[in-house]
Structures are given as structure tokens and as C-alpha cells.
Amino acid sequence: MSRQGIGSKIDHTRLSIDIRLKEVVEEYRACCRLGVRGFVSHPWIVARLSDIVDKCDTILIGVVSFPYGMDSLEAKLRTIDYLFSSGADEVDVVSNVNLLLNGFYKEYVDEVMGLTSYVKDSWRRGIKIIVEVTILNDRLLRKAVEAINRAGPDFFKTSTGKGPRGTTVEDVSAIRGMLSPDIGIKASGGIRNCKAATALLDAGADIIGSSSGIAIVEECMGIGDEGREA
């Protein structure tokens, strides 16, 4: 698989609680070398990276209301403002799927529509809406997809990686069958190797999100421990 072929479909994430800025800078530069699509981290980290690294084709992506999505819409919009004004290129926003779990479908639609329209109208940048599909049954997943179709973000992202399981090929296939063709799918959660990533891409995902993103690209490209192609 070519460098551009796999790297352009990977968002490498660094969302742990014990982040060292020096290590994050090294990871971002590795993403640049490997042609990785995006580097995802917390707002504070994205803002610092924007100040101290030379930007490359790897875009900076900040998470909003991570990992539970239970902040108010107003709080999420403030974080979006902070991220874009601090140099982020794109945002991954956790939607409040607890609204769906408790029967508040209209409120859920209002939230995802408000988030999407704000980013598109006020910032004209990219937005992914994170739907924690790992805690939804088939009926609620369909409701979530209906809401995302109405809102029209750039991507439907499947998981925060903090749910009870990882994203599966079956999840992606089901979502692709219901989702507007104009909206991409970012599969994330429990994806740690080239085989898993490519299976999800084959099932209909457009982007893979993983804390093992760099390792996945290197494995798919056949790069050995010494940094040479095998």
C-alpha cells in the first residue's frame, strides 16, 4: 500500500491523560513524514502545537466535549471558537448521545444541527460529529444517523474509543447503508493494526482514527523497526 494511500486515511490521536508536549511534537512530525491525514488531541495541546511546530499537510484536529459529550451546546461552541482561533483545522465533537438514550430526539437533532451549522457558517472548516455507536441499539443508531443526515457534517465518527467495545466492520457497514453519501465515516475505537484498519476501510469507512495511527501506517507501508521499508 502506498504512503499516500494509507496515510491520507489515518487520523493519529493522542488523547491520553499523561501527555508530554515534547513527545506530542515528535509524533506530529512523524505524522508529517508519513503523510498522515490528521493529528488529533485535546484543545490545550492543539493550541500549543499550532504555536511551536511548522505546519505540514497533516492537519491539526481538536476534540470537543471529549469523551462523554455532556457539555451544553454553548460550552461546545466556546471550545470550537477556542480551537479554530488557536490554529486548529478541524474539530471532532462528541455529541450527547445520552439525549437519545433518554428519548430526547428533538434535542439531539437540535444539538448536532447547531454544531454543524455553526462550524460551517462561522468558521467554514471541517467538523466530525462523534456518535458513540458502541452504546446504541439498532433503533437508536438509526435515529442517530437520521439526525446526522439532517445536520450534514463532514463526517460521522463512530466512537470516542472509551466505549464498552471497539468499532466493528458490521457497525461501519450498517452506518454506510443509512448515511447520506455526502457524509464520510470516520471509524475509531479499538483499531490497532493494518489488518483491522483496512477491513474497516473496505467496509465503507473513509478515515480511521487511532492512537496507533503512526504504527498502522508504518505496518501497512512495510516499514521495519529501523525506519526502512521491509
Image: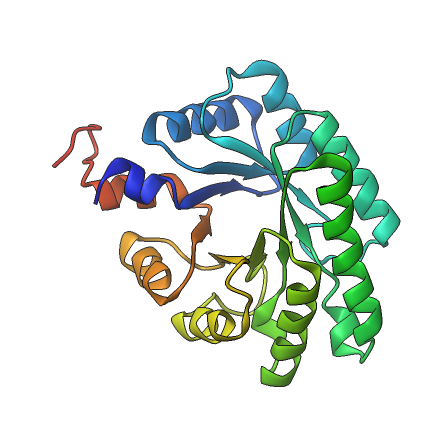
Q: Is residue 179 left or right of residue 149?
A: left
Residue at figure coordinates x 51%, y 28% from the top left: 24
Which quadrant of the rendered structure holds the C terminus? top left
Whole-percent x, y for residue 105 in the image: 79, 75
Whole-percent x, y for residue 200 in the image: 37, 62
Q: Is residue 180 left or right of residue 197?
A: right
Which quadrant of the rendered structure holds the N terminus? top left
Q: How many numbered discs sit on the rendered protein? A: 0
- In-front residue for pair 132/128: 128
* Quarter occupied by residue 203: bottom left
Residue at figure coordinates x 58%, y 15% from the top left: 52
- In-front residue for pair 122/4: 122
Whole-percent x, y for residue 191 in the image: 40, 57
Q: Is residue 64 above or below residue 49?
A: below
Residue at figure coordinates x 59%, y 51% from the top left: 154
Q: Is residue 38 above or below residue 140?
A: above
- In-front residue for pair 88/18: 88
What is the image's colouring? rainbow
Q: Is residue 88 above or below residue 189?
A: above
* Quarter occupied by residue 31: top left
- In-front residue for pair 191/203: 203
Whole-percent x, y for residue 149 in the image: 64, 66
Return the residue found at the far left: 230
Return the residue found at the far bottom: 139
Residue at figure coordinates x 41%, y 44% from the top left: 10
